[in-house]
Amino acid sequence: MYFLMTVDVESFSIPLNREDPGVVKQVHEEGLPRLLSLLAKHDVCGTFYFTGTFAEASPESVELVCEHGHEVGCHGYDHSPHRAFDVLSYEEQLNDLKKAKAIIESVAGEIVSFRAPALRINEDTVRALEETGFRTDSSVCSQRFDGPFTFGSKRKLKWLFAPRRPYFLSYDSIAKKGDSKILEIPISALLLSFSGTVMRRSPLLTKILQRYLFFESKQNDKPVVFLFHPNECLEFKGKVIPTRRSANFFEYLFADLIRQKLKLKNLGMVSLKLLDEILASASEYGFEFLTVKEYEIAYKTHQH
């Protein structure tokens, strides 16, 4: 049984509901050290997906992650909704991947693991990833359902039909097995995602979800993939007026106002305490902690 601790490192401000350059320094000085210390406590090696803009602004953050023995992957070039991969052309995706990869690899060396910003990919992404030398993607969240609470939610309905176990992506559909060289390692979910965001919103529902996912893994060797962000480790107190990111009223209401209010729950040390409990439970249950790259090697070895 394998547990994959995955971390998306981006300059997104949860209180402001938008990218904010000031978050980079906070994440480097507070968020990352806190998270890395917790992972070391449980002897966890994880995969940190950096955006190109974050790595460009703080190469020392990439170095810090490498020094702690974790894998570094790519989280696209930036995290702007209008630059999501599922709205970019093949050429635009290719350029973004090349640009981000060059920046990150200048610090971390070769990277082969990818996760899209906001988990938004399309069929062009598969070929773009192959062209730029990536071997895995972890953007699909099988059987997760966000309804209107996320951008690109209509496109993400495909997730409801995606395989729950890792599979090679199809050139025709990101929710089907195919003949590409990109191994999709889905983020664990069952209507709700197994992630820091859901964990902070509802620790009780997360415990119920966790029990099911752990049992499922024991039955069929499906890896448990948890998604977290170091900016969730930052303390926040006070009131904010969230940035409006969509002209569509319903997207603004659900994906900006309501969702952002929920995302403010249990930030900082409370978040770390909740994550501490999940990692301790995984260890007690008998999981082996692997990076995405290590899992890909194990998967291909087993397949052959």
Image (spheres, rainbow, N blue to C red):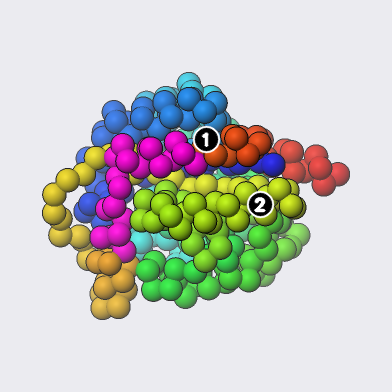
In whole angstroms, how far apart are the C-alphas of marks 1 and 2?
16 Å
Is label 2 in a helix, a strand or a loop? helix
What span is in magenta?
A: 259-278
Is label 1 in a helix, a strand or a loop? helix
Which residue, as the protein is rendered here, is positioned at the far bottom? 249
> Which residue is located at x 43 percent, y 55 percent?
204
Query: Where does the image place residue 39, in percent across and percent down from the top left?
Result: 48, 30
**Residue labelled with disc 1:** 280
Name the residue type under label 2: Phe
Q: Earlier in the sequence, mark 1 or mark 2?
A: 2
**Residue labelled with disc 2:** 215
Say if residue 184 shows up in the picture.
Answer: yes
Residue 100 as seen in the image, left or right of residue 46: left
Residue 228 as seen in the image, left or right of residue 281: left
> Which residue is located at x 27 percent, y 53 percent?
264
Q: Nearer the viewer, residue 224 or 250?
A: 224
Q: Quadrant of residue 50?
A: top left
